[in-house]
Image (spheres, rainbow, N blue to C red):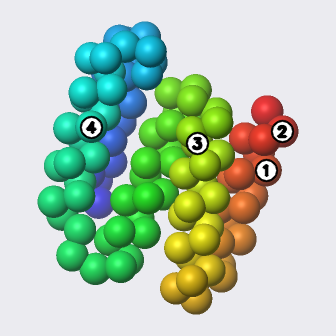
Protein backbone atom coordinates (compact mmCIF):
# COMPACT_ATOMS: atom_id res chain seq x y z
CA UNK A 1 0.00 0.00 0.00
CA UNK A 2 1.39 3.38 -1.02
CA UNK A 3 0.39 5.16 2.19
CA UNK A 4 2.04 2.50 4.36
CA UNK A 5 5.21 2.78 2.25
CA UNK A 6 5.20 6.55 2.83
CA UNK A 7 4.91 6.03 6.60
CA UNK A 8 7.74 3.47 6.51
CA UNK A 9 9.97 5.79 4.47
CA UNK A 10 9.16 8.64 6.85
CA UNK A 11 10.20 6.50 9.82
CA UNK A 12 13.43 5.53 8.03
CA UNK A 13 14.32 9.14 7.28
CA UNK A 14 13.52 10.28 10.79
CA UNK A 15 15.65 7.52 12.35
CA UNK A 16 18.53 8.46 10.04
CA UNK A 17 18.20 12.16 10.89
CA UNK A 18 18.28 11.34 14.59
CA UNK A 19 21.56 9.48 14.18
CA UNK A 20 20.32 5.91 13.96
CA UNK A 21 19.36 3.62 16.78
CA UNK A 22 22.05 5.02 19.07
CA UNK A 23 19.51 7.75 19.76
CA UNK A 24 16.72 7.08 22.25
CA UNK A 25 14.52 9.41 20.24
CA UNK A 26 15.11 7.31 17.10
CA UNK A 27 14.24 4.14 19.01
CA UNK A 28 11.03 5.82 20.14
CA UNK A 29 10.13 6.81 16.55
CA UNK A 30 10.77 3.24 15.39
CA UNK A 31 8.73 1.83 18.28
CA UNK A 32 5.79 4.10 17.47
CA UNK A 33 5.94 3.09 13.80
CA UNK A 34 5.93 -0.61 14.78
CA UNK A 35 3.02 -0.07 17.18
CA UNK A 36 1.07 1.73 14.46
CA UNK A 37 1.75 -1.04 11.96
CA UNK A 38 0.95 -3.83 14.45
CA UNK A 39 -2.46 -2.26 14.92
CA UNK A 40 -3.16 -3.03 11.25
CA UNK A 41 -2.20 -6.72 11.48
CA UNK A 42 -5.27 -8.87 10.95
CA UNK A 43 -3.87 -11.99 9.25
CA UNK A 44 -0.69 -14.10 9.11
CA UNK A 45 0.05 -12.44 5.78
CA UNK A 46 -0.16 -9.01 7.44
CA UNK A 47 2.19 -10.17 10.20
CA UNK A 48 4.62 -11.54 7.64
CA UNK A 49 4.62 -8.29 5.65
CA UNK A 50 5.25 -6.34 8.84
CA UNK A 51 8.23 -8.55 9.67
CA UNK A 52 9.63 -7.94 6.19
CA UNK A 53 9.07 -4.19 6.61
CA UNK A 54 10.91 -4.21 9.94
CA UNK A 55 13.87 -5.95 8.29
CA UNK A 56 13.82 -3.38 5.48
CA UNK A 57 13.85 -0.49 7.95
CA UNK A 58 16.84 -1.93 9.78
CA UNK A 59 18.60 -2.45 6.46
CA UNK A 60 17.89 1.05 5.18
CA UNK A 61 19.09 2.78 8.34
CA UNK A 62 22.31 0.78 8.27
CA UNK A 63 21.65 -1.56 11.20
CA UNK A 64 23.18 -4.57 9.44
CA UNK A 65 23.08 -7.10 12.31
CA UNK A 66 19.48 -6.25 13.24
CA UNK A 67 18.49 -6.45 9.57
CA UNK A 68 20.09 -9.90 9.25
CA UNK A 69 18.23 -11.15 12.34
CA UNK A 70 14.93 -9.70 11.11
CA UNK A 71 15.37 -11.24 7.66
CA UNK A 72 16.09 -14.63 9.24
CA UNK A 73 12.86 -14.29 11.25
CA UNK A 74 10.89 -13.38 8.12
CA UNK A 75 12.45 -16.28 6.19
CA UNK A 76 11.51 -18.71 8.97
CA UNK A 77 7.96 -17.40 8.93
CA UNK A 78 7.78 -17.67 5.13
CA UNK A 79 8.97 -21.29 5.22
CA UNK A 80 6.56 -22.18 8.03
CA UNK A 81 3.67 -20.68 6.04
CA UNK A 82 4.63 -22.36 2.75
CA UNK A 83 5.73 -19.13 1.05
CA UNK A 84 8.81 -20.57 -0.63
CA UNK A 85 8.95 -17.88 -3.33
CA UNK A 86 9.05 -15.14 -0.71
CA UNK A 87 11.58 -17.10 1.35
CA UNK A 88 13.85 -17.35 -1.69
CA UNK A 89 13.48 -13.62 -2.36
CA UNK A 90 14.37 -12.80 1.25
CA UNK A 91 17.38 -15.13 1.16
CA UNK A 92 18.73 -13.10 -1.78
CA UNK A 93 18.28 -9.86 0.19
CA UNK A 94 19.96 -11.47 3.18
CA UNK A 95 22.96 -12.56 1.12
CA UNK A 96 23.27 -9.07 -0.33
CA UNK A 97 23.42 -7.59 3.17
CA UNK A 98 25.89 -10.18 4.41
CA UNK A 99 28.15 -9.52 1.41
CA UNK A 100 27.98 -5.72 1.65
Image vertical order of residue 2 relative to residue 74, above or below: above
* Whole-number angstrom distance, CA of label 1 to CA of label 4: 27 Å
Badge 2 element: loop
**Which tag is nearer the camera, tag 1 or tag 4?**
4
Left or right? Give the position of 52 relative to 36: right
Which comes sooner in the sequence, label 3 or label 1? Answer: 3
Badge 4 element: helix
Camera-side residue: 87 or 10? 87
Disc 1 + disc 2, Cβ < 8 Å: yes
Badge 1 element: helix
Which comes sooner in the sequence, label 3 or label 2? Answer: 3
Are there few (<14), some (14-19), or many (20+) residues within 10 Å of tag 4?
few
Are there few (<14), some (14-19), or many (20+) residues within 10 Å of tag 1?
few
**Which tag is nearer the camera, tag 3 or tag 2?**
3
In this figure, which residue is indicated by the disc labeled 1? 95
In this figure, which residue is indicated by the disc labeled 2? 99
Disc 3 + disc 1, Cβ < 8 Å: no
* Whole-number angstrom distance, CA of label 4 to CA of label 3: 15 Å
* Whole-number angstrom distance, CA of label 3 to CA of label 1: 11 Å
Image vertical order of residue 66 relative to residue 17, above or below: below
Badge 3 element: helix
Where in the figure is residue 55, as x and y percent of width and height? 51, 48
**Which tag is nearer the camera, tag 3 or tag 1?**
3
**Which tag is nearer the camera, tag 2 or tag 4?**
4
* Whole-number angstrom distance, CA of label 1 to CA of label 2: 6 Å
Question: In which image quadrant can residue 41 be found?
Answer: bottom left
Q: Residue at x 27, y 46 (%)?
A: 34
Mark linked to residue 31: 4
Mark linked to residue 67: 3
Give the quadrant of the N terminus: bottom left
Furthest residue in direction bottom, as rendered = 82
Q: Examine the rendering and report whether any part of residue 3 can be seen.
A: no
Amino acid sequence: NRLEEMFKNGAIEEVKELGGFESDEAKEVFGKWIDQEQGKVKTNDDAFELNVSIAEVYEKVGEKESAIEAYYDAIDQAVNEGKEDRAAELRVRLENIRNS
